[in-house]
Amino acid sequence: MKVSLKSGDTLNSFVATNENGHEVKLSGDGSAVGPMQSVLMAIAGCSTIDIVMILEKMRQPLENIEVEVEAERREEIPRTFTKVNLHYKLTGKLKEGKVEQAINSSLDKYCSVSKMIEKSAEISSSYEIVE
């Protein structure tokens, strides 16, 4: 796996590019996604991809999924995360037990990002099912 990062329009904005040419804009001044925000986006993406795949294998009729992530950080430098909460909103005629199992399997076993973050932060989750 390889990525590169180059200065963008200003010295405080950057463009990260992966091996396939996909780009993400980052900044330290609020003009784009901040690096720590990108970590929260990564845990949301990683876990949601897992959850979709797990629910498909369980033959659960998922129609849509959204996730909101909230986090707390240390006041001291380095300002690492201390708490991360992921709230999933799933749409479809889903069995609650299957949804809970899929979320727990992702965060506890499959999502590489959550496994890294859990070394420094408490990770919690919640969900709601909309039919």
Image (cartoon, rainbow, N blue to C red):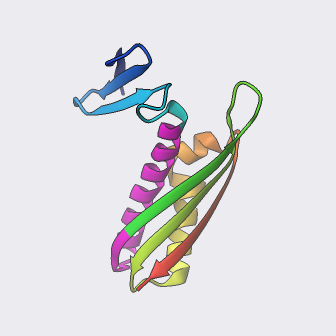
- Residue at the extreme left: 21
In the image, what residue occupies the spot 50% across and 66% down? 88
Task: Look at the magenta stretch and give its main secondary structure.
Answer: helix
Q: In this rendering, would 16 be left or right of 41?
A: left
Picture coordinates of residue 34 (x, y %)?
A: 49, 33
Residue 117 in magenta stretch: no
In the image, what residue occupies the spot 50% across and 25% down? 28
Relative vertical location of residue 88 with respect to residue 62 in this rendering, above or below: above
Picture coordinates of residue 41 (x, y %)?
A: 46, 46
The magenta span reads 37-64
Residue 2 visible in image:
no
Quadrant position of the N terminus in the picture: top left
Residue 56 in magenta stretch: yes
Picture coordinates of residue 27 (x, y %)?
A: 44, 26
Residue 115 visible in image:
yes
Relative vertical location of residue 74 with respect to residue 130 in this rendering, above or below: above
Picture coordinates of residue 129 (x, y %)?
A: 48, 79
In the image, what residue occupies the spot 39% across and 56% down? 49
Relative vertical location of residue 97 with respect to residue 47 in this rendering, above or below: below
Of the pair 129 and 98, the residue shown nearer to us? 129
Tell me the quarter of the picture where residue 104 sits. bottom right
